[in-house]
Image: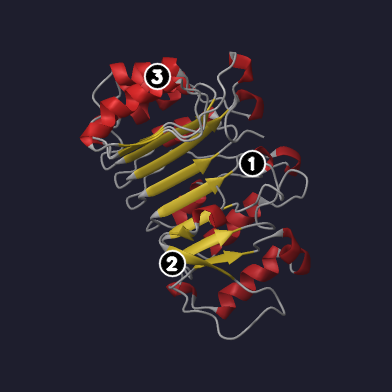
Amino acid sequence: MTIDQLGTLHGLPVFDFPAPGEERGPLPPAGEVAWRLARDEMVTGVEPFETCWYRFLDAVDPAQVRALVLGAGAYGSELSGGDPEETVGRLVAAADRLSGLEALYLADLTHEESELSWMVQGDVTPVLVAYPRLLELGVRGSGGGFSGAPGLELTPVRHEHLRVLRLENGGLPGEVARGLAASDLPGLRRLDLWLGEEAYGCSTTLADLAPLLDGDRLPALRHLGLQNSEMQDEIAAAVAGAPVVARLASLHLGLGTLTDTGAAALLSGQPLTHLEELDLNHHYLSDPLMRRLRETLEPFGVKVNLDGQEQTGEEGDRYIAAGE
């Protein structure tokens, strides 16, 4: 989900840092917007990201910057390049200047600029280490591809203040899921994982997710999204008995190949009537099962999102919302 689809980052309106020659009056106060740098390929064709980065740090008061979005140039595709290790290195080196940074979104590329699974990523652990007061981190893509980068990595880390973590993938590596599960994130309130499919690099298993579903290492978690998966039925069945669900306010299991089998398992498990929201958008449920979900949960005030009913077919005909 691109920043334009989200609309804001960390509650702040997104503001495109002007390219050379685009300046039209004074810049907004540094802490009142989410700054987007190198927003598209057209801009990065005018100015390399490295130049844009240092020009930005000189143009604003970095200590007042609260939210930052990095796009094309900082994070390219397998075909267009973009070195994630260099980008992470620049972020780490600027940590003493960006001392008030609260939110960071890495790889804001549109579908036209790169398919999701072609977006080049690297190790994001150094960012969490360098910014111990970061509240929100969004990472889009996981591939290394032709760039020679290793692909998305996250090694076990302790971070006291992180509240929101969003990993959007067409294929989530199992090593990343295991690194996350072994991390100590006592303040995390919202976790969104797009798992993807094996054809695009997903090697995450239910066993990798088990520590997250147990919830012991995520005591503050109130929203869980395990989405965009070709094993959505199995995930729903695992969630049905997961201890973490009892303290959630919202649960997102959409964007994948959920069928009546998974939804029935979900309904036959622990009660979900305490939820404020159950989002199953993009699914393969039948009309009777959709009615059963609504009749079971909506009388208790649960908002049930069943948008995106796809045509039910054979297993090979089902697809996740965001793959390639």
Q: Quadrant of residue 305?
A: top left
Return the residue nearer the eye: 6 or 191.
6
Q: Quadrant of residue 220?
A: top left
Q: Are marks 3 and 1 in contact (CB under 8 Å)?
A: no
Amino acid type at circle 3 is: Pro
Q: Disc 3 vs disc 2: which is toward the camera?
A: 3
Task: Provide residue 106's location: percent of width, then percent of height.
Answer: 56, 53
**Badge 1 density bin: few <14, some 14–19, many ≥20, Cα 10 Å:** many
Amino acid type at circle 1 is: Leu
- For the point 62% across and 56% down, the residue is 87
**Badge 2 density bin: few <14, some 14–19, many ≥20, Cα 10 Å:** many
Q: Are marks 2 and 1 in contact (CB under 8 Å)?
A: no
Q: Which mark is residue 66?
A: 2
Label 2, label 1: how many angstroms apart (C-alpha)?
26 Å
Q: Which mark is residue 288?
A: 3
Task: Provide residue 70's location: percent of width, then percent of height.
Answer: 59, 59
Q: Disc 3 vs disc 1: which is toward the camera?
A: 3
Q: Quadrant of residue 261?
A: top left
Q: Which residue is mark 1?
A: 116
Amino acid type at circle 2 is: Arg
SS at mark 2? loop
- For the point 29% across and 16% down, the residue is 268
SS at mark 3? helix
